[in-house]
Every structure is written in structure tokens, then in C-alpha cells.
Amino acid sequence: MKPVQARCCFAAIACLFISHICSAGISAYGQEREGFTFRQGIGFRQVGPIHVPTDGSANSYPKADRSNWWQAAYSVDSFSRLDEIWSAHRIPHGQASILPRSQSELQINYVSPGFPGGSQQGLDGYFHKNPVTGLILAKDGQIVVERYQYHRNDRQRMTSFSMAKTLIAMMVGIAVHEGRIRSIEDKAELYARELKGTAYGASPIRHLLTMSSGVKFREEYDGQDDTARLARATFGRQTAGGVEATRLFNDRIAPPGERWSYASSETYVLALVLRAAIGRSLADYFAEKIWIPIGAEADATWLTDAAGNELGYMGFNAVLRDYARLGIMMAQQGRFKDRQIIPLSWWRDMTRAHFSPHQTGRWYGYGYQTWIFPANDGSFALLGVRGQSIFVDPANRLVLVQTAVRPLPRDPGAADTTALWRGFKSTVLKP
């Protein structure tokens, strides 16, 4: 999802990584360590392993606009205010729920895969190595780690990229439960009637949910792929949006359900189907059914196309603790406090592998717009390019939330996040 650009730009920015690693320990509230100042249990620092100051100061980063927002040099700014650069619908919050916090930051060690033979690192080492803008770790609904760097903070709305896809699947499940969508075996055109006569219109909702419609779409993030075309056609305003954008991808190359192929266009079509089925904006529906019930503490936003349709496949923006609330709700089988928000049967279906890692060709399996960890222990993930992640382990009530500015869409640094997740699990689950 980016405009045309030279790959060498990414390579140049990637060279700015700092590999200096420090040991981690327990951070008491109010303590300053490794450049982090802790206030009310939250760690902040002005710098990070990749930054390009405009005037030599630690908190000045290049200002992004519509022409450069995707470029690595501008992403510190753009990824924390994408809804100011592009048009978006606001998602209002209600009364904030309380997220308890541990009395001290949990000490975590993990084996980093980025060093020969592996190397034992701690949280400080993780932040020195990885271009993370925000990180939260939670156990049993309690925050045990919360930190920000690059002068980002807990009031900025960080963008989701494809983590938004899983939110669409949540709402589809609620719409099915309410009878607004009669069956996921129905074809998309039964609800979004303007899709009639198109390949996507003839695709069953089930196969849109599992990225197996059989419609040709290439998602490689090279600036020339179908993802770039979709971005330009939707929030880039090169088409009127809606069905006009989907007609760019109208070549069926396999029967629905036969093969898995990751395609952001499938989620965009799902968003059109959902909006038609509920008869209102996705922002309003999401606020009523999910955002207010989980006690979000701040408004969220969702980027829109020229027709005012929420993109669905990307463009959701929220503060980090509200992402954590979403993760905690999903760790509790779709339940938050005493309310079942996602129907339990749907939660089970969306968080199990309908396609195995062998079938996807990825490390993960795939459920309903959700990535499934290969261990098949019930853990799953919401993932977005450039380092956006929510990891969920329902069996142990563990959640990791990360926003980042990795320079590459498919960045090898993601392996370090998975290693940190393993270290977190080992720390809290050890006898």
C-alpha cells in the first residue's frame, strides 16, 4: 500500500539501525534508565534506533504529507497521524474502562535471532535494536510493560495497516449473529448489489474471509503491485471508490476456496458487503458494537475512500492502550468484563486455521482475516506491515501490542518481535 518509490530508499534507511544492545532490568516508576523516563509506570524516550531529525534535536522528525508518508524517513511522523494526512471517519469512545498496571515493569529476557547462535537480550536491548514506536505487554488484563520512543506518546493514534482486517472479521461475525448477514455462504453481490457481474460479487463471503476467493491480486509491496493500485484507487482518490475500485481486480484464476492468496482487496470487498448489510457506516457500527463496549479511552479513526467507505483493509488508527483493550478482549474469547462482544462461536471460527502454514506458504496459518500461530495452541495475531502487531494467547491471557516504523514492508526484524513474545511467555509461565 504505497506509491511508487525506489527500493534503494529503504536500503539506505535500513543501514541506520543501531545494533548496540544493553541489558534489561526492572524499571521502577519515575526512574530514568537507558534514555527512558518512566512516568506513572510508562516509559518514554525521545530517540530510537532509526531517526532523521530536521534540526538536530531529538524530538524533531521530518513532517509527512501525501507524497511521502510511506517513505521510511517520514514514517515516525506519518504513522502516528495518518488520519490527519488522509480523510477519515471518527469512531467515538464512551466511558473508559480501567486497565490495571503492575507496580513495576516486568523483567523480560529473550533470545534474539539477529545474532550468530542467538543472544540473550532484555527490553532495553529490544528497543535499541528495533524501531518500535510503542509497546504494551499484558497478562490477565494487567499491563506489565508500556513504553514509547521516537518522542511518540500514549495520546497519539498509531496506524494499524492490515491489523484492521481482523476488525472487519469481528464485525462480520456480529452482523451474522444479528441476522444482518444471513450466511457467510452467500455471495458478496447479495448484499453489495453494485458488485453484481464482477468476480468479487460472485465470491462467497466465507472465501473472502479466508483470502481464498480465487480472484487474481498480487500483494508484494514493490510499488507496482495490485496493493499499490488499490491504495491509489481508494484513499488515493484515483477512482470514485467502492465498486469502481474493485473492478480493477476482476480476473478469476481459481474456483472460490481452492487456494489461499493474501489480498487486501478481499477485505475491501468485505467492508463494502458489511456496510451494505448493516445500512450504516462501519465507524458507527464499530463504535456501538466494539469500541464503546471495551471501554476505549480515546476516539479512533478509519481512513475512507472518495465515496466515504471505510477502507477495511487498513487505515484504522488508535492509541496504544485501546489496541491493548482489543487484544485483551480477544484473549478472553471475545469477552470484555461481563459482556460477550464477539459471539463465542464466531470467535472460535475466526481464530482457528482454515488454511495451514503449508497452504499459505507463510510461517502462520490463516483464519478469518486473522493469522494463526503454527503451534496451533490457540494463539493468533493481528499483523500489519512495517511492524504493527497484536499477539494473543487466550489460554494464558497474554497480549503483546506493538507499533513500529520498520523500513521494509516484509522486514526481517519481525523475527525479533516473535522472539520477544516467546521470552514474555517464558517469563510469566515459568514455575
Image (spheres, rainbow, N blue to C red):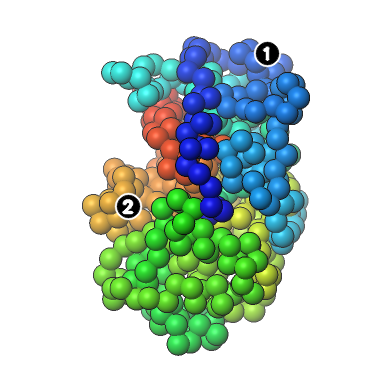
**Is 185 rendered above or below residue 394?**
below
Query: Which residue corresponds to the image point at 68% horizontal and 39% vertical from the top-left?
Result: 77
Q: Quadrant of residue 219?
A: bottom left
Q: Which mark is residue 243?
A: none
Looking at the picture, tell me which residue is in the foreground, 107 or 275. Answer: 275
Q: Quadrant of residue 285?
A: bottom right
Percent x, y of residue 199: 41, 80
Residues packed near mark 1 inside 10 Å, few (<14), some (14 to 19) or many (20 plus): some
Name the residue beneath numbered marker 1.
32
Name the residue beneath numbered marker 2.
365
Percent x, y of residue 383: 47, 47
Looking at the picture, tell me which residue is in the foreground, 196 or 357. Answer: 196
In the picture, measured across the screen, residue 140 lies left or right of residue 211, that is: right
Residues packed near mark 2 inside 10 Å, few (<14), some (14 to 19) or many (20 plus): many
Percent x, y of residue 39: 72, 22
Query: Which residue corresponds to the image point at 46% horizontal and 62% vertical from the top-left?
Result: 226
Question: Mark 1: which amino acid?
Answer: Glu
| Residue 161 can be seen, yes or no | yes
In the picture, measured across the screen, residue 411 lies left or right of residue 327, that is: left
- State how far apart marks 1 and 2 are (Cα): 41 Å
| Residue 350 can be seen, yes or no | no
**Is 39 rendered above or below residue 274?**
above
